[in-house]
Image (tube, coloured by chain):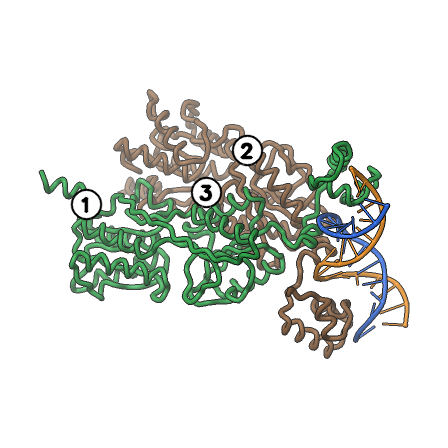
Chain colours: A green, B brown, C blue, D orange
Amino acid sequence: MIVTIKDIAKNTNFSYATVSRALNSKPGISKKTREIILAEAEKMGYQPNGLARGLVMKHTNTIGLVIPDIVNPFFPEIARGVEDTASKLGYNVFLCNTSWDVDKESSYLKALLEKRVDGIIIKPACDRPCSYSNSNIPMVLLNKMPRESKHSYIEIDNFKGGYLATKHLIEAGYKRIAFLGGIEDSYSTIERLEGYIHAFKQSNYKIDKSLIVYGDYNFKTGYANMTKLMGLENPPDAAFAVNDFNALGVLQFVGELGLSVPDEFGIVGFDNIQYAAFPQIQLTTISQPKYEIGKYATEALINQINNKTAKFMQKIILEPELIVRKTTLNSKSVAKATNQ
Amino acid sequence: MIVTIKDIAKNTNFSYATVSRALNSKPGISKKTREIILAEAEKMGYQPNGLARGLVMKHTNTIGLVIPDIVNPFFPEIARGVEDTASKLGYNVFLCNTSWDVDKESSYLKALLEKRVDGIIIKPACDRPCSYSNSNIPMVLLNKMPRESKHSYIEIDNFKGGYLATKHLIEAGYKRIAFLGGIEDSYSTIERLEGYIHAFKQSNYKIDKSLIVYGDYNFKTGYANMTKLMGLENPPDAAFAVNDFNALGVLQFVGELGLSVPDEFGIVGFDNIQYAAFPQIQLTTISQPKYEIGKYATEALINQINNKTAKFMQKIILEPELIVRKTTLNSKSVAKATNQ
DNA sequence: CTGAAAGCGCTAACAC
DNA sequence: GTGTTAGCGCTTTCAG
């Protein structure tokens, strides 16, 4: 039923070795026999067995992609970047969703190791060193980790992202700019907040701690945080949200409040997910090159796989980009208007 | 470096066989030796080798998921449904994006076969019988295929979906309802069109062929098709679009034209992707239970894998559901208003 | 209850 | 150029 290298050896009266050489385009074999063998393989419908090959070769041309949730619109593009470039380089990719759950994460990691993946790309389920930390498999992280110097990582310059967003809001003329962070002690939130503070200092704005709040990465959180903020004695007139999902929640709350955006309230998000560009939404945001993150991560990983001896670690920091849309006053047109 | 069953056999002075039995919780082994072996395995950091196991067991607990594009918002939820239930049942899943390209599709299929996946879930890249058709691996298709009786499939009742959408538009009082189809000869488009026609007949509306157009599944297509339709001598006052992406294009065009939705123009989409529910969008649509599609497909597949002898084929037809939001007049409130 | 040995399908020395 | 053979790490009869 299933045809092996042996069967085709029998049919062609060559040895396994020769058949194997022919099938793998190895040198040291006459053109004619190669053709005979290939023809027979084709005819018999031969399908190489990757398991057997992997067993002896000690690699599988397979990588794992471990992310929190493919439904979160931040991840599909990354996944696509990973899968496209892996495929181009001859690798297949296992997709794993951890739901931000460290137990699930470590069980996936274990499964991947059993399947003998050659490497792993992972967005850690939490910012504390976890299960993967002591693994020796080539790995690239989708964000920087505290006290972690073993694995390569790739991420956006969060400080700069926070800075650009805040500076834009300031230049657009907003006076009381709220910061809607993610998890309080997560690196990305900390760094974006530093960018925010830096922009404030640069403009001699003074920090109002009541305007700095935290939460998670969901729509609802943006909404809930705004409820709190707008109840303040001295409420904000603009918000920089940790991600676009959050910003959308802000947008809704502000809309329900009857404030006009961007005239009475400015919003900038983070990530530039597809939704942000929709005509009905037009969210100003800090763009992360998601597809490229996936692509570069994969290239770095496979590079690492192919240079096992070197064991070098790479840090890749990507540039954020401010995308001005319609949820903020465009400072340039404001300036122009002022001049006339 | 890497510890095998042999190493732990050596250390415990048992044979491979016994170790293997202990590790796999097989019967016929004393409690004590099992404990000794397990402890040693733990201590040595033993990681079973799935390749070796797969080679002898002839299955890998691995499935392939082949879809056009994970970035298309229709697919992440399906993928999540697949991955969650696969994981629950002890399987890992390979993700493959074909970009609707049949050559890519068949090359992925080949790779998956080499990797010895136990089964495949696939949204075919085209509606003609393709590469996979003659494969004997357990497979479930994410839509019905013409002249295909070999593989199981799961899909929504497209006829009913088309019918519900159109009927809703009719009841809401729209008079000239356009049909924006996908690929003209694709099954799903054909069946939705039949549903549309059925609703028309039921209400004694007459079909105007100039209002039936085709395209693909993108935003731009919806926009482009609307350009055409609104240039008609007798343009439509509503549209039923093949999917939500398309509908969003329609929404934009209509908005730019200055028509008010839903008062002057009604729109219903298909799929109920996340975007559709956004406060700023609120698209009326026909919902597909995407996560469940993935879930049921996986259950059917693994069921099939475990019953290789039976070789039964399953057809699963899911119920569509009309979700009324704000891009159509709500016929009930219309009725109410009339009564007062 | 435990061990010996065969073999899954393939690659890679090493011979000739 | 080609064949022989060992062995990758594991499961599974078959003996005992």
Image quarter in which the C terminus of chain A is found: top left
Disc 3 crowd rating (10 Å Cα; few below 14, some 14-19, many 20+) is some
Residue at x 61%, y 58% (from the top left corner): B89
Furthest residue to the bottom?
Answer: B32
The front one of A75 and A310 is: A310
Q: Is residue B281 above or below residue A301?
A: above
What residue did someone put label 1 on? A331
Q: Name the secondary structure under disc 2.
A: helix
Q: Position of residue C7 (x, y in %)?
A: 81, 54
Q: Position of residue A178 (x, y in %)?
A: 23, 59
Furthest residue to the left?
Answer: A340
Q: Name the secondary structure under disc 1.
A: helix
The front one of A109 and A217 is: A109
Q: Chain of mark 3?
A: B
Q: Are marks 1 and 3 in contact (CB under 8 Å)?
A: no
Task: Using the rendered image of the protein, determine whether residue A122 is visible from the camera's viewpoint.
Answer: no
What residue did someone put label 2 on? B187
Mark number, residue B72 = 3
The nearer-to-camera label among 1 and 3 is 1
Q: Chain of mark 2?
A: B
Whole-angstrom CA distance, mark 3 to mark 2, is: 20 Å
